[in-house]
């Protein structure tokens, strides 16, 4: 199963609710972060984005990368072409290690943007109104509302994501509601998987 939602929607919090119910969750962002320690990936990154995204100590400068790709869709595509196939290979290996589970979750903000939806039986969308998302991003990333808006603008509209998904978690009614809706979706998925 895929779990997605735009920046600031709270998809990681919702994924943690599923994990609390015993559902293993693969976080694409966390796994992608490990690539920045991989020499082969760094070599490919230098070729795609140039030396300016590296600090003097040879490490990739994630802030510089973000500044470039959030302002250049072509460069963003180049970065995605490097990251996504590698993350999906990691995911396939991880799936093999959890083959005895009723179902697994793949958490990523860009399931639809990267055309990954075909890999999953069902998609869960975590949704929150724009003003709440901006407030969360500003607090979390210590940034400005303008920059938060700019970054949100690089992702697919959340209304569209919700329409394309099988389940929607409206993540702005508080923890009790969130827990109840996650439990309800969990029960439906278990019903669906045991019927096979």
Image (cartoon, rainbow, N blue to C red):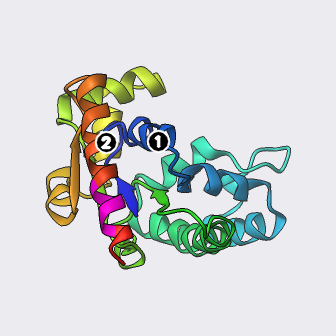
Instruction: In the rendered structure, find residue 182 and report the number of the disc placed on it.
Output: 2
Q: Quadrant of residue 190?
A: bottom left
Horizontal placement of 91 versus 57: left or right?
left
Instruction: Find residue 43 and report its horizontal and vertical position in percent.
Output: 77, 69
Q: Quadrant of residue 7?
A: top left
Say which label, 2 or 1, has the lower sequence index. 1
- Callout 1: helix, strand or loop? loop
Q: Residue at x 59, y 46 (%)?
A: 64
Q: For marks 2 and 1, give the CA distance.
A: 9 Å
What main secondary structure does the magenta stretch of the protein show? helix
Give the residue number, with chain letter if any, for mark 1. 21
Horizontal placement of 45 versus 170: left or right?
right
Q: Is residue 37 above or below residue 119?
A: above
Horizontal placement of 17 versus 63: left or right?
left
Q: Is residue 70 visible?
A: yes
- Callout 2: helix, strand or loop? helix
Q: Residue at x 36, y 75 (%)?
A: 115
Contact (Cβ within 8 Å) of mark 2 with mark 1: yes
Q: Quadrant of the C terminus?
A: bottom left
Instruction: Find residue 105 and report its horizontal and vertical position in percent.
Output: 47, 58
Instruction: Find residue 38 and report its horizontal and vertical position in percent.
Output: 80, 61
Instruction: Find residue 123 and report its horizontal and vertical position in percent.
Output: 31, 63
Q: Residue at x 42, y 35 (%)?
A: 13
Magenta part of the chain: 188-192
The residue lying toward the viewer, choosing from 27 and 144, is 27
Tell me if residue 72 is in the magenta stretch. Answer: no
Q: Is residue 169 above or below residue 100?
A: above
Tell me if residue 190 is in the magenta stretch. Answer: yes
Q: Is residue 144 visible?
A: no
The residue lying toward the viewer, choosing from 79 and 112, is 112
Q: Quadrant of residue 171?
A: top left
């Amino acid at each position: 199963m895929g779990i997605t939602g735009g920046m600031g929607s709270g998809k990681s919090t919702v994924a943690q609710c599923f994990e609390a119910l015993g559902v293993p969750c693969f976080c694409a962002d966390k796994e992608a972060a490990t690539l920045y320690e991989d020499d082969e990936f760094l070599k490919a990154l230098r070729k795609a984005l140039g030396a300016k995204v590296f600090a003097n100590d040879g490490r990739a400068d994630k802030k510089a990368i973000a500044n470039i790709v959030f302002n250049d869709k072509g460069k963003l595509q180049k970065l995605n072409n490097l990251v996504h196939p590698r993350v999906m290979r990691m995911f396939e290996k991880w799936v093999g290690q959890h083959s005895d589970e009723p179902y697994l979750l793949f958490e990523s903000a860009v399931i639809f943007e990267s055309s990954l939806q075909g890999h999953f039986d069902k998609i869960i969308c975590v949704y929150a109104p724009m003003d709440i998302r901006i407030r969360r991003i500003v607090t979390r990333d210590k940034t400005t509302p303008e920059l938060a808006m700019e970054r949100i603008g690089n992702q697919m509209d959340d209304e569209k994501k919700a329409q394309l998904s099988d389940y929607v978690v409206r993540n702005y009614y508080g923890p009790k509601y969130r827990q109840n809706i996650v439990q309800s979706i969990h029960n439906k998925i278990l019903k669906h998987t045991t019927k096979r």
